[in-house]
Image: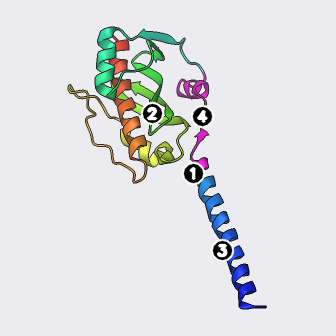
Amino acid sequence: MTSRGASGASARRASVALAAVAALLFAAAASARGVYQTPEAFVREVYAGDPPAPRLLWLTKELQAEAAHILGHDYPAARLRYWLRDERSAWILEEIGKEKPITVGIVIDGGKIELVRVLIFRESRGDEVRHSFFTDQYKGAALRSDRELDRPIDGITGATLSVRALTRLARLALFLHDEAAR
């Protein structure tokens, strides 16, 4: 084989290897997206198969202003559906991570977070926020008078925007629970 033929074969092998690496990277990015649990299944689970009837919270101008303060932007809906039994409420909320919405189920009991669960993740990266090693940080968190959580939430390298989105939703759910429980 001539040196020209050997270098051509090496170039083809390098091209194939590069294509394989690119395919793996694309597959890894695409795998961050997923439906981990439907909102309906989440509500059934948190109420042990017997959820209360859903209720609606209308976002008045005052509530919209407070939600905008918490989120840093207007909330896109005029009303929110939630489930409430005694002092325990369940919320299905969405917030943009980087470019796409993240759907999160949050349970509040007695003014404190009982559970945060990522239900649907649509971003190409940052899905580490769906794991319990991250979401367990929210358990027991409450809202201070300045509408911030009463504890710090550790971030995740490469998932900064997803972490911020979940933290804003946790704050919003606590605020909405207080309004709905009145």
Q: Is residue 166 left or right of residue 14?
A: left
**Mark 4 Cα shell of 10 Å, populated few (<14), some (14-19), many (≥20):** some
Can residue 99 be seen here? The reply is yes
Q: Quadrant of the N terminus?
A: bottom right
Q: Identify the residue position indicated by label 3 in the image.
A: 14
**Mark 3 Cα shell of 10 Å, populated few (<14), some (14-19), many (≥20):** few
Residue positioned most to the left:
145
Q: Quadrant of the C terminus?
A: top left
| Front one among 66 and 72 | 72
Q: Earlier in the sequence, mark 3 or mark 4?
A: 3
Which dot, 1 or 3, sits closer to the camera? 3
Q: Secondary structure at mark 3?
A: helix
**Mark 1 Cα shell of 10 Å, populated few (<14), some (14-19), many (≥20):** some
Q: Earlier in the sequence, mark 2 or mark 4?
A: 4
Magenta segment, which residues?
A: 30-49
The amino acid at mark 4 is: Gln
Mark drawn on residue 37: 4
Q: Identify which residue is drawn at 34% across, 25% down.
A: 73
Cβ–Cβ under 8 Å for marks 1 and 3:
no
